[in-house]
């Protein structure tokens, strides 16, 4: 490994430009949060805006988790091609502490009104006009895991671990810019070896607690892997968007080449196939076993109580084609992967469909008097958009606020010279 510093431009990002963009992002984020809050306060059915807010927070937390996992995977495999891109994911990790703050209202609401978001928190909650949660044998079997104190403690613990790991990784990487000590690379390798199992466990438990337990009768052994696939795809797509933005702004000129775009495009293709494999396997196993405790979850997303097809069936088709077929076919093309405006469009497309996937997993928990899932194209979709814009504005603000605090690229990383001359 080369231990020499990079000779390519690596000045601090323009403070005034980043500061102005950060301010705009924060204003947009606050506006989105205010609109979501107004929806919760003024809507006759407050449950919809609250669940939509859960979609927004979960969506952006998933992307941040993906960035954390990408940074740690980079270190654990000693990758060279991704060194300059890794720095942008490190800046993205600054959002974790703000995501925790934004998740707190959901925890407070759950304490004030148990069962409002996660029905199992209220033992007196009536299930489909029959028994209560407390008398439900399936809940009794799962109560050691599904109980409010453990849920609250685990959720706080998730964010503590993510913030702590992020701080360690960022400190070692940023400090290396100053002193050039290669020991910081070894430190981050140790951090990653410890952090990857922690990241895998926490993201799995977070997916089960926050999303899967909305319908706690359901069984799935692949849910954490599904969530992980979306985390990684979100992080890779955000990486592409940032790469193109910084290149066109002039910061990455002379640093990035087509091979960097090709490499990240290959990973996008790999995780597209991975998501399809996990999702198909989950559906196929549940369909093949035909166990009521498992099939009902998909039935809610396909049929109404009278046997008619509901809107969620069409959303499922959107996921099949939009989450897999379209990006898979597009990313097979070398030209599409290395052409900046095309791969950026693919990234935006996948980010949008990941949001639809989050809606597909969360919003059908909202049901009408017949027990049918509320339509996808309803007023709740408006609150999803305001929530995603609100939480996203805060996350982008955190990234832009971190961006000018250090060098654009890790100028003294041992692999930086290999990265700058990266070839296929």
Image (cartoon, grey):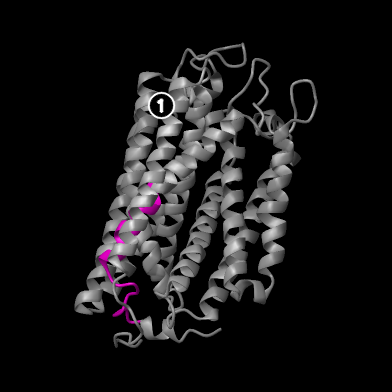
Query: Is residue 174 toward the left or the right of residue 307 in the image?
Result: left
Query: Is residue 7 toward the left or the right of residue 321 in the image?
Result: left
From the viewer's perspective, is residue 167 above or below residue 11?
A: above
Q: Is residue 281 visible?
A: yes
Q: Is residue 404 magenta?
A: yes
Residue 32: x and y in percent read 44, 39
- Which residue: 68% across, 52% down? 322
Q: Secondary structure at mark 1?
A: loop
From the viewer's perspective, is residue 308 above or below residue 271?
A: above
Residue 382: x and y in percent read 56, 34
- Tell me the quadrant of the picture where the N terminus can be found: bottom left
Q: Which residues are magenta?
A: 394-414
Q: Which residue is mark 1?
A: 147
Q: Residues within 10 Å of mark 1 (few under 14, many from 20)?
A: some
- Find residue 173 and report its image quarter: bottom left
Residue 25: x and y in percent read 39, 50
Q: Residue furthest left?
A: 179
- Tell me the quadrant of the picture where the C terminus can be found: bottom right
Marker count (numbered):
1
From the viewer's perspective, is residue 293 above or below residue 20?
A: above
- Which residue: 53% across, 48% down? 227
Residue 53: x and y in percent read 47, 34
Q: Is residue 79 magenta?
A: no
């Amino acid at each position: 490994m080369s231990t020499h510093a990079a000779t390519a431009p690596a000045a601090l990002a323009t403070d005034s430009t980043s500061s102005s963009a950060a301010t705009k992002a924060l204003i947009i984020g606050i506006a989105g949060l205010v609109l979501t809050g107004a929806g919760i306060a003024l809507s006759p059915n407050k449950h919809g805006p609250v669940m939509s807010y859960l979609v927004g927070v979960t969506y952006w937390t998933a992307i941040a988790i993906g960035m954390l996992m990408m940074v740690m995977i980079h270190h654990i495999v000693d990758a060279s091609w991704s060194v300059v891109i890794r720095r942008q994911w490190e800046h993205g990790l600054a959002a974790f502490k703000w995501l925790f703050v934004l998740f707190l209202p959901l925890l407070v609401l759950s304490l004030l009104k148990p069962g409002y978001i996660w029905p199992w928190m209220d033992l007196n909650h009536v299930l489909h006009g029959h028994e209560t949660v407390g008398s439900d044998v399936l809940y009794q079997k799962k109560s050691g895991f599904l109980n409010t104190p453990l849920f609250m403690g685990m959720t706080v613990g998730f964010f503590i671990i993510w913030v702590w790991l992020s701080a360690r990784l960022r400190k070692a990487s940023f400090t290396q810019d100053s002193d050039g000590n290669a020991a910081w690379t070894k430190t981050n390798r140790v951090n990653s070896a410890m952090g990857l199992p922690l990241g895998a466990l926490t993201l799995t438990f977070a997916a089960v607690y926050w999303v899967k337990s909305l319908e706690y009768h359901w069984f799935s052994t692949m849910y954490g892997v599904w969530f992980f696939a979306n985390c990684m795809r979100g992080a890779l797509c955000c990486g592409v968007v940032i790469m193109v933005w910084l290149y066109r702004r002039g910061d990455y000129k002379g640093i990035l080449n087509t091979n960097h775009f090709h490499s990240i495009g290959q990973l996008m293709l790999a995780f597209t196939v991975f998501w399809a494999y996990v999702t198909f396997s989950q559906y196929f196993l549940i369909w093949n076993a035909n166990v009521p405790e498992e099939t009902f979850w998909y039935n809610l997303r396909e049929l109404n109580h009278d046997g008619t097809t509901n809107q969620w069936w069409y959303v499922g088709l959107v996921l099949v084609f939009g989450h897999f077929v379209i990006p898979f076919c597009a990313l097979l093309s070398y030209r599409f992967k290395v052409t900046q405006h095309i791969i950026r469009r693919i990234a935006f497309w996948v980010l949008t469909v990941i949001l639809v996937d989050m809606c597909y997993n969360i919003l059908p928990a909202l049901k009408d008097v017949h027990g049918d899932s509320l339509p996808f194209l309803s007023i709740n979709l408006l609150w999803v958009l305001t929530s995603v814009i609100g939480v996203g504005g805060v996350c982008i603000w955190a990234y832009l606020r971190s961006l000018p605090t250090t060098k654009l690229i890790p100028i003294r990383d041992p692999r930086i010279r290999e990265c700058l001359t990266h070839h296929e």
